[in-house]
Amino acid sequence: MERTVQFNLTVEGRLTTSAMTNTTQSGREFVTFTIVHQDQYRDHTGKWVDAKPMFFDIVCWGKLAGHVRNLTRGTIVVIEGGRLLGYINDNELAGLKVEARNVSLSMRFGEAHPGPAKRTRRADLVTTADGEQITADAYPDVVTDRELLHH
């Protein structure tokens, strides 16, 4: 039997997976993704040491689910959560399942951009099957095979 606890949590982490949309048996939509938070601390010598990573499985319901469905792997977010269920994941690292009340983009390490991130490769040329060379930044979503890129 699962037991949930009501509490307040704010945590910043990087998405380890892109957001996935699912539905319950009754048709209610929800979005899930996993974030990892890894803190640093100073040891007894004063040297900075990475703490063990902590994983959080996040679930979003309702309008929030609609807003976060396009989050992609690598995005840094700040989660405000309320209900949780603790567990040990496959790697025997502690983790928490958290129901999010709010999700925000973290701007501590970079700028936030609305919508899905567009990957560009400036100055790379793509050779099409017809032998035509096109700049990769003109077609950022089409080119995924690195062997097609020529510098």
Image (cartoon, rainbow, N blue to C red):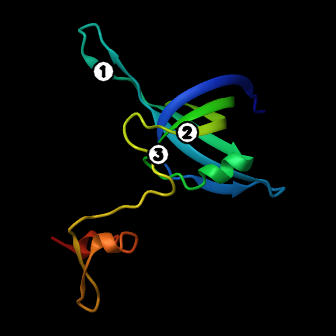
* Mark 2 / mark 3, whichever is N-terminal: 3
- Pinpoint residue 80: horizontal percent, then vertical percent: 62, 31
Specify the farthest residue to the right: 26
Residue under label 2: 104
Answer with mark 1 or mark 3, whichever residue precedes in sequence: 3
Please name the residue that numbered disc 1 is placed on.
49
Looking at the image, residue 17 sits to the left or right of residue 138; the answer is right
Residue at (74, 28) in percent of width and height: 4
Disc 2/disc 3 C-alpha distance (Å) = 16 Å
Residue 25 coordinates in the image, percent (x, y) = 81, 56
Q: Nearer the viewer, mark 1 or mark 2?
A: 2
Read off the residue under disc 3.
16
Please, what is the three-letter code of the amino acid marked with disc 3?
Thr
- Mark 2: secondary structure: strand
Query: In the rendered image, is residue 91 in sight?
Result: no
- Residue depicted at x 22% and y 70%: 124
Q: CA distance from mark 1 to mark 3?
A: 22 Å
Residue 35 location (% of width, % of height): 51, 39
